Image (cartoon, grey):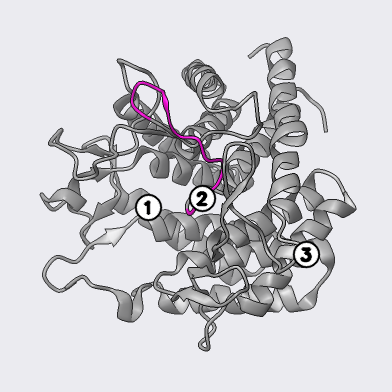
Amino acid sequence: MNQIDILQSQNIYQQALLEDVIPFWEKHSVDAQQGGYFTCLERDGTVYDTDKFMWLQARQVWTFAMLFNHQEKRSSWLEMAGHGADFLRRFGRNATGDWYFALDRAGNPLVEAYNIFSDCFAVIALAEFAEAAEEDWAKQLALKTYWRIQQRKDNPKGRFNKRITATRPLLSMALPMITIGLTTVLNRLFPDPELDRVVDENIQLVMNKFVDRRLKTVFEHVSPDGSHPNCFEGRLLNPGHALEAMWFILEVAQLRNDRTLVNQATEAMLWTIERGWDPEHGGIFYFLDEKGAPPEKLEWDMKLWWVHLEAIYAFLLAHHLTGEKVFEKWFQELHQYTWSHFPDPEFGEWFGYLNRRGEVTHTLKGGKWKGCFHVPRALFLCAQLLAKMAGGN
């Protein structure tokens, strides 16, 4: 990319973050009466459901604390993060210390801690908030939750697991992927050699089990020995997860100046985008079947906001680390598709769900699964990296 393109792109991402997306959530999401955030927002920001989902509450705490720590020391951002952190502290956990999935508006539990992902996002939220607010309780709760995750990782659903694992044991990439990301955040804030070990262990798991170099494929599920059972789950590909995992790994490789790992991760990215790109309508498929069989997921051909945002940053980072034109090409292709389909110029923020043709299927800006996270995170990361590429601060 030439200097003009870099500067123009940096301005696009920075402006969208600070003048569009963040103001939307500041204006519409705060529950001033009962704490926490509203995440179920219609296109214009109107609240259409007041239930509070712990992983989205935590993600929004992280977003505003991260911006305070790394973008600008705005007191309003710290206040926003503290508003959500207080709600997490008061209502987020059950009696065993595990994090609920959903609460009602007042903080009464609705859905138990049936999986581990609320806990994962609580860790990065509390860690980033602890750094921003200098609150020791948040640091201690982040660390306590993190090590509880490590205790639960082999059976994260516990008594809620409905699978008979002895018949067909499977590993899922979701947990090692997110473990790399959250451990890297925690290790940056509170360095610990044991956290380095956890990162290494999960990188090896992803790159040696889920990345299949012979088939040139990144699988979502594998058998414990790395083989691929011929079933729906064993054939499932999730391009968004694969690309997100690879940029997590690229950031670790960059910190360690590990060129071998950079090459391995960027190679896997190319396999993923070449298979996952829709040649007819553009954009990345949500799910695919490795053998080309009919996918189990009925929404397989939809185009989702988070998939494209993770892909944009992944290919920009790959281009930055390698200098190779193929990654610049894919960044530009993804940028063009994403910016022409997802942003809402009338009411702000981004649509989340498109059909295969790129038409909006859900006009919501937030819901049970979409909140204040993927859009601002990708905009921030891209703006920061483009500024670095331009030689700025």
Which label's residue is closer to the chain start, 1 or 2? 1
Q: CB atoms at circles 1 and 3 under 8 Å apart?
A: no
Instruction: Describe the element under mark 1 as helix, strand or loop.
Output: helix
Which label's residue is closer to the chain start, 3 or 2? 3
Q: Position of residue 156 (x, y in %)?
A: 38, 72
Q: Position of residue 279 (x, y in %)?
A: 31, 17
Identify the image quadrant of residue 183: bottom right
Instruction: Describe the element under mark 3 as helix, strand or loop.
Output: helix
Q: Determine the CA span between mark 1 and mark 2.
A: 30 Å
Badge 1 is on which residue?
206
Badge 2 is on which residue?
367
Badge 3 is on which residue?
82
Kind of residue sitting beneath label 2: Gly
Instruction: Describe the element under mark 2 as helix, strand or loop.
Output: loop
In the figure, is residue 90 to the left or right of 161?
A: right
Q: Position of residue 25 (x, y in %)?
A: 70, 46
Q: Position of residue 243 (x, y in %)?
A: 44, 39
Q: Residues within 10 Å of mark 1 (few under 14, many from 20)?
A: many
User: What quarter of the picture does the N terminus occupy?
Assistant: top right
Which of labels 1 and 2 is toward the front?
2
